[in-house]
Image: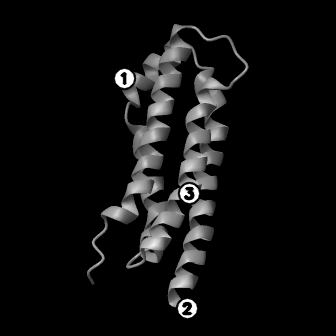
Amino acid sequence: MKKILQCLGTLVTSVLCSYLLWLLFYWLTPYVMGVGWFLFFVYLFFAGGLLTGVIGSLSTILAIPVAYLTSNNMVAKIINAIPLLVFGYCSVCLPWGLNMEYKLLQYIIAISLSATYLITFVSLLICPFSIDDDK
């Protein structure tokens, strides 16, 4: 019974965490894609790791309950992967699906956003499998 509850809790938590990250990226992507060269260089030189640090901290906070729920349960770890793959794919496609004219700057930003989104969801995907289950 404990394993079934772990699987259900993992599914609910994983869907919620994946949706919250996707929602953040869905809200953030149009604003970031619309910046000009000046704001791009300002971000690059002055705030060059702030967004990455915030997203990394957020994904770590979201991974803690999932890692706790998937301990000693391989089925729960696999169930965790399904929503992460779906929402991760949708997030990586976000910068490329906007109805806008792409220039060099938009291609650079879209590639960097896709890489950030991909790394975030892959780290959340790998986290439960890399945690040592010995307590």
Callout 3–callout 2 Cβ contact below 8 Å: no
Q: Quadrant of residue 127?
A: bottom left
Amino acid carrying label 3: it is Ile
Q: Do we see residue 1 in this rendering?
A: yes
The residue carrying mark 1 is 45
Spatial CA span between label 1 and label 2: 53 Å
- Classify 132 as above or below 37: below
Q: CA distance from mark 3 to mark 2?
A: 22 Å
In the figure, is residue 68 to the left or right of 96?
A: left
Secondary structure under the numbered disc 2 in the rendered image: loop
Quarter of the picture containing the C terminus is: bottom left
Q: Give 132 or 21, whichever is nearer the viewer.
A: 132
Q: Residue at x 47, y 48 (%)?
A: 121
**Of the two numbered discs 1 and 3 in the rendering, the one whose residue sits closer to the viewer:** 3
- The spot of residue 57 in percent (x, y) is 42, 53
Q: CA distance from mark 1 to mark 3?
A: 37 Å
Check the image and report above or below for 55 versus 78. above
Under circle 1, the secondary element is helix
Mark earlier in primary sequence (1, 3): 1
Residue at figure coordinates x 38%, y 27% from the top left: 46
Q: Quick one: label 1, few (<14), some, or many (20+) residues within 10 Å? A: few
The residue indicated by pointer 2 is 1
Can residue 54 be spotted in the picture?
Answer: no
Residue that label 3 marks: 82
Q: Is residue 124 above or below residue 4?
A: above
Q: Are marks 1 and 3 in contact (CB under 8 Å)?
A: no
Relative image position of residue 18 (x, y in whole percent): 58, 55
Across and down, in percent, residue 68 comes to 43, 75
Q: Residue at x 50, y 84 (%)?
A: 3
* Amino acid bearing label 1: Phe
Residue situated furthest top in the rendering: 103
